Image (tube, helix red, strand yellow):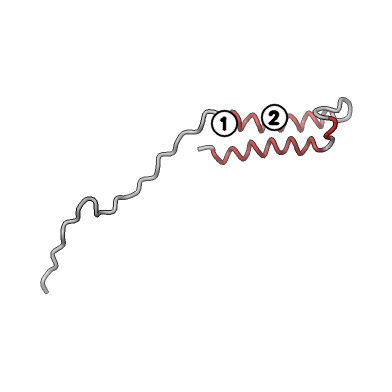
Amino acid sequence: MPEKSEKPRKKSDAAEPQLPHKASANPRWLVPTMLTLMLVGLAWIVTYYLTSQNLGLPVPALGNWNLLVGFVLIIAGFSLTTRWK
């Protein structure tokens, strides 16, 4: 059988391997904001528990909704961790 002659491939025809994109660095505000939100949320809840009987802090009108405020701050901080590289 006669051998088929292969044409040399041009460089543009060859499939070049895709290199993974270099991960960009974190924005400078990300880690401080993430940690601040989590710590402020924790401080809000602790302050509410420690002072709810006597002083009515952090916000007396909210009552038990202060727990929701604290947890929302903590969850917002944790949601920022998904952007951390």
Instruction: Look at the numbered disc 1 and give the secondary structure of its residue.
Output: helix
Who's the residue at 56% across and 32% down the image?
30
Q: Quadrant of residue 3?
A: bottom left
Left or right, 82 with respect to 38, comes to: left
Q: Nearer the viewer, residue 42 or 72?
A: 72
**Position of the N terminus by quadrant:** bottom left
Q: Amino acid at mark 2?
A: Val
Q: Quadrant of residue 77?
A: top right
Of pointers 1 and 2, the one earlier in the residue sequence = 1
- Could you say where residue 38 lies in the image, as x and y percent from the top left? 66, 33
Residue reaching furthest to the top: 55
- Could you say where residue 28 lies in the image, as x and y percent from the top left? 52, 28
Badge number at residue 40: 2
Q: Nearer the viewer, residue 10 or 70?
A: 10
Who's the residue at 54% across and 39% down the image?
83
Give the distance between the C-alpha atoms of the residues marked 1 and 2, in whole angstroms.
14 Å
Q: Quadrant of residue 82?
A: top right
Left or right, 1 with respect to 29, comes to: left
Q: How many tags in the picture?
A: 2
Badge number at residue 17: none
Left or right, 64 with respect to 85, comes to: right
- Could you say where residue 60 lies in the image, as x and y percent from the top left? 85, 30
Q: Mark 1 and 2 residues: CB-CB less than 8 Å, in contact? A: no
Mark 1 Cα within 10 Å, few/some/many (few <14, many 20+)? some
Q: Examine the rendered structure and indicate whether residue 43 appears above or below residue 20.
A: above
Instruction: Look at the numbered disc 2 and give the secondary structure of its residue.
Output: helix
Badge number at residue 31: 1
Residue reaching furthest to the bottom: 1
Who's the residue at 79% across and 35% down the image?
66
Who's the residue at 29% across and 53% down the image?
15
Q: Amino acid at mark 1?
A: Val
Left or right, 28 with respect to 33, comes to: left
